[in-house]
Image (cartoon, coloured by chain):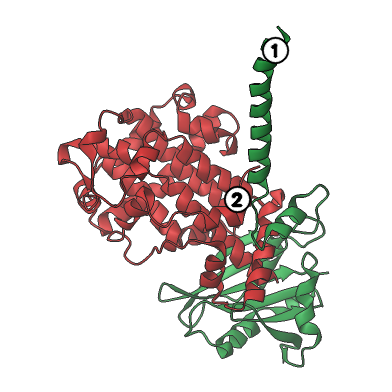
Amino acid sequence: MSKTIYQLVDELPSGGMTVMALRSLDIVVPGEWQNLVGFDNTIRAVTGETDPAFIQQIGERAVYLFNDKSQGYQTALWLYQSVDRASSALGAAALANKVGEKVPLLGFLGNITPKAEKAQTIDLAVKLVVELVAFCQINGIPGDSIGDFLASLGDYSGESLMRMAALVCFDGLIPLGPDFIQMVLSRFNNMSPQELEQNQSFQGVKDQIPGGNSDGKLGFINESFGSVSGWMGDFVKSRGLTPQKVAQNLSNFIEFSDDKLDYLGAFLDVSTNYYEHTGIQTLARRLIERAVAEI
Amino acid sequence: MNFNRLRRIIPALLLAVLLLVTSTSCRAQDTSPYAQTQKQSTQRGATPAVAKNAEQGSSFNKFFPKSADGYQVVPAQEKKGFAEYKLNKDGKNVAVMSINDTVSTPDAQKKYQQSTEKIGGYPAAEAPGNATGVLVNNRYQVKVASRDPSFTKNDRVTWLQKFNLSGIAQLK
């Protein structure tokens, strides 16, 4: 049987590559993310409640909500996990042992291969769409209008904002360079449904992407990416982000040279699962918020 | 001959026993205080978390207060039987507001049964998570929960009064 929601939250790592990579982004979204781990701990942090009996009651309702398949929370978890799993797990275990000391990236170059630019652009767009679909599975489509929904999406903070920052930095800027948004937009404009079909990340989650057939799904991804591209562009510009700046922050725990940024991208791909990590944190928060409101 | 066969079978049997023992011991490890709830909520025929006849979350939207006095009201969740809005000030989340149909959580009504306090004519009570709530028509729980210490009980009562409570009372 797969893990329970409280096991998933209890077992979130408090250190390791994913956590270190995300911490390196604190400079991008200062103070937004604390690595909140542990189910009861999350209940205390979200509600401010300290009475163990209340905490238990809130937790029980959250477990019930998660296990009711019709509520969409399990689908969201599956999406967050699948999109990370598509990135190869190669070398992740070996790297886990390296944490705490500086990892000389060059030593690992023999084991990792950067993805082709095409695969990388599709990955980025698929991840973004997964974010949108998972958001709807967790939160429904809140409010009465598209404007309400967008306001709700735009109100990202904490671990959700950190996930978007990591998406922009680790899956956009580092592997694809400063013009990654334009690159994805133009590539998707010329893409055939067959090309999309061949991508592993898309294959993993395609059943949950709206649009019917691959042609329709391609349209949906294109439209979603297009509509969030403005937000991403502002994010990059307002924070003065460049591949070098992001890499500089990562250099606190990884040694590499500037001309190997595509390898750094591949390294992050195989050694981190930031989507699943922060996704579980988002899911737990929303479940707990709902649970405490309902009891 | 028989012995040889036996020699081949025994390791296989031992392996099978080993696998069985390890897999059962792995499964028996859930000592969490939520293990019982996990079992209840996943067993065959378990009561779903949300009752079939719960009101749609979308019908709650129009009863929430609107942005005012420097506060922004932002939609957050809308599920069957539940809707939640954030209350932000200066870009910071200070409280959350919610309406839920207690048809799925009848225990939630208990705290209002002994209540002597009323807000907007409905029984009011303090709830877990620094929250104040009212129960409308003995069914719909309307709550405001503080997420920042600056948002006091008085603020919660003020914002509860901004809900269209009589509108909620019109729902069935």
Left or right of residue A66, residue B44 in this image? right
Quadrant where the image shows the C terminus of chain A: bottom right
Q: Which residue is mark 1?
A: B3
State the residue lying farthest toward the top. B1
Residue B92, position as x, y percentages in the image: 43, 73
Residue located at (57% from left, 61% from top): A286
Secondary structure, mark 1, is helix
Q: What amino acid type should be assigned to the residue bearing mark 1? A: Phe
- Tell me if mark 2 has few (under 14), some (14-19) or many (20+) residues whose alpha carbon lies within 10 angstroms of its own: many
> What's the chain of the residue with tag 2?
A
Secondary structure, mark 2, is helix
Q: Colour of chain B?
A: green
Q: Nearer the viewer, residue B109 or A213?
A: B109
Instruction: Tell me: residue B100, above or below residue A68.
Output: below
Q: Which residue is mark 2?
A: A137
Q: Colour of chain A?
A: red
Q: CA distance from mark 1 to mark 2?
A: 60 Å
User: Which picture quadrant has residue A35?
Assistant: bottom left
Q: Nearer the viewer, residue A79 or A60?
A: A60
